[in-house]
Amino acid sequence: MWFAEKWTSRTGGAFKLLSTGRIRAFVRQSELGLLLLGVASGICAGLVVVVVSLTAQTMHALIFEVPLGERLSGWTDLDPRIAVSAPLAGGVILGIVMLVVARWRKRPIVDPIEANALHGGRMSVTDSVIVVVQNLISNGFGASVGLEAGYTQLSSAFSSKVGIIMKLRRGDLRLLVGCGSAGAIAAAFNAPLTGAFYAFELITGSYNIASLAPVVVSALVATMVARVFIPSGFIIDAEAFRSVATTDYLPALLLGFFCAASGILLMRGVSLVEETARKSAVPPVVRPALGGIVVGILALVSPQILSGGHGALHLTLDQKVGVSALVSLFLLKAVASAVSIGAGFRGGLFFASLFLGALLGKIYAIGANLLLASSALSETTYAVMGMSCLAAAVIGGPLTMTFLALEVTGDFPITALTLAAVITASVTVRSTFGYSFATWRFHLRGESIRSAHDVGWIRNLTVDKMMRLDMRTANAGMTAGAFKLAFPLGSTQRVIILDDQGKYAGLIIVPDLFSDPEIEPEQHIADFIRHKNAFLSPNMNAKQAAAIFDDAESEELAVLNNNIERRVVGLLTESHTLRRYSEELEKRRREVSGEV
C-alpha cells in the first residue's frame, strides 16, 4: 500500500510536467491531442495486461506446480492436496488484506462503470492497485474468477490519472477511462474491435465520431503491445462452415433465450450467496476462507473450475464430451464462480460467462441436432454462439460479444448467427431482469445506475444549490383579513405557512383568498392551506424534484431540512428547476459531441 502511495506521488510529479503550457492546451483543444492520449492509454493498458497476466501465471506455477505457459484450468494432473488447500490459503490471505485495507482506506473503491456514471471519470490509482492485488490473490490461488476486472480497473485508473492532471473536461476524462478499458479488453483477448465496443457499450455508454479514433487506437495499440510479450492463446477453430441458411436462425434464437435464462439464474445465484453471507454471523474477512474451502472441494471433482477457465474452455472445445460431463462441469463452474464472488474473492464474471456459455452451447447443440434435422451446425459453432450469448446476458454489450465471436474465430457466417442469438439474449435479459451483472450489484447497494451514462452531474445538481432563500411566511393561526393586509394581491404568489412551533404546515396561494368574495375576514387561513405533505429536501437532485413538482401539480414548493423537524430552509420553483436541468443537459451534450 505504501508503494502505491509513493508511486502515485512520484508519477504525479512527472505527469505535472505534461500538464503545463502548450501541451495541456493542445490536448484539451485538439482531437489529435486526444488521439495521442489514446495511444498512451493503449500502451499502458497493454503493459498492465502483460504484467498482471504473467504474475498470475507465475503464481499458478509456484502454487499449483503447473508448467509455465500452461493454463491452470486446463491442467488435469493436479495434486488433490494442493487443489484443496490453495483456495483456502488464498482466502485467508485475502481476508488479511481486506482487514488491512478496511482500516486504511475508508472510502469505497470505484470501478470504471461507476466512475463514468457518477464521478465524471475520476478514479484512484491507489484504489485500483488494491483491486489488482486482491484480484491476483483470488485468481492466483485458484478462486473461480477472471483477471479482466483487474485489467480494466488499473488501465482505466492510469488513463483517468493523466486526464485529471491535465485538467481535461468531464467528457474527455470519461473518454480516457473508456480508452483504458478498451485497451485492457483488447489486449486480453487479442480483439481490438471487442475492446473498442466494450468501451462504447459498457464504459462510456455512448458512441460518436469524436470518440471513435481515441478508443479504437487505444485498443489497437494495446493489442500490439501485449502480443510483443505474450502470444495470443484465445483463438477458436470454428471448423469448416457453410453459408448461413434461413433454417439456422431458429435454433440460434432459441439458444439466445436459453442463455438469457441461464444468465439471470447465474446473477441471482451470486446475489443469493452474497446475501446469505451478509445475513450470517461470519465476519467479512473470514468469508473468503470459507469460500476457498468450497472451491477446493469442487476442484477435487473437476480442476477445470479453478481460476478464470481459459485452459478449460479450449480443452472442452477441442474434445468430444458427453452431455452428462458437460452438465456436471457447467453446474460445478457456476457454483464455484457464485461462491467465489459471493464469498468476497475479487474478480468478475467476464471469462466465467464465456466458459459457461460455451458449455451451454455444446449441451444445446446435442439436443438441437437431434430435434432439428434441418440444422447442420457443429457443436463448436453452437459453443461460440453460446459463449457470446451468455456473456452478453451477464456482462452486457451485445455488439461487444458479437465482435468477440468474429475476432476469435475469424468466421463471418458464424458472426451473423451469433448477432441474432446475442440480440435475443440481450433483449430478453433487459426486458425480464433489467440489469447486467455490474449494474445489478449497484442495484443491490441501493444505486439506480443502469449503465455508464453520465448521471453524476444530475446528482450534483441538488435542490440546495437551486433554491431561493427569500421566503414569505405566515402563522397558521392568522385570519383571512390579517393575511390580506400582510400580503396584498400582487405582492407575492405563494406564502409558506408555519404552525405555532415554527414547523412547516403548507402553502397558501394568495389569489385564492382574494378571488372568493364570500370569505369572511375572521375566517382562519387554515382552510386554504395546500401541499401540507408535498415538499422538497435539500439533497434531492433536479430529476427527483421535477417528479415531485409533477405529482403535487404545484409550480412552487417549500424545501424542508427533514421530515421530523420540518423546518423551512428554502423555496424552489418548477420553472427554475427545469431551466437549470436543461442548461446542464445541454452542457453535457455539447461536451459529448465535442462542441466548444
Image: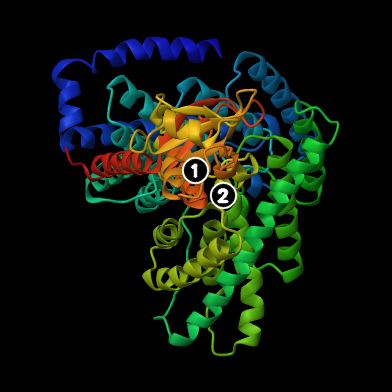
- Which residue is more in the foreground, 111 or 444? 444
Q: Residue at x 69, y 50 (%)?
A: 304
Is 557 on the left or on the right of 576, as rendered? right
- Which residue is more in the foreground, 416 or 461? 461
Q: Residue at x 43, y 62 (%)?
A: 402
Secondary-structure class at tag 1? helix
Is 145 on the left or on the right of 55, as rendered? right
Q: Residue at x 81, y 37 (%)?
A: 279
Residue type (three-letter) at the residue carrying disc 1: Gln
Is 28 on the left or on the right of 485, as rendered? left
- Which residue is more in the foreground, 350 or 28? 28
Residue type (three-letter) at the residue carrying disc 2: Phe
Residue 357 in view here: yes
Q: In which quarter of the image is the C terminus?
A: top left
**Which residue bears the numbered disc 1?**
544
Image coordinates of residue 459 in percent, x first then y, are: 45, 35
* 495 versus 428 height, above or below: above
- Between the residue at mark 2 and the residue at mark 1, the CA separation in whole angstroms equals 38 Å
Location of residue 441 (image quadrant):
top right
The earlier-in-sequence mark between 2 and 1 is 2
In this view, the residue farthest toward the right is: 281
Mark number, residue 395: none
**Mark 2 vs mark 1: in front:** 1
Q: How many marks overall?
A: 2
**Which residue bears the numbered disc 2?**
351
* 68 versus 420 height, above or below: above
Image coordinates of residue 177 in percent, x first then y, are: 38, 35
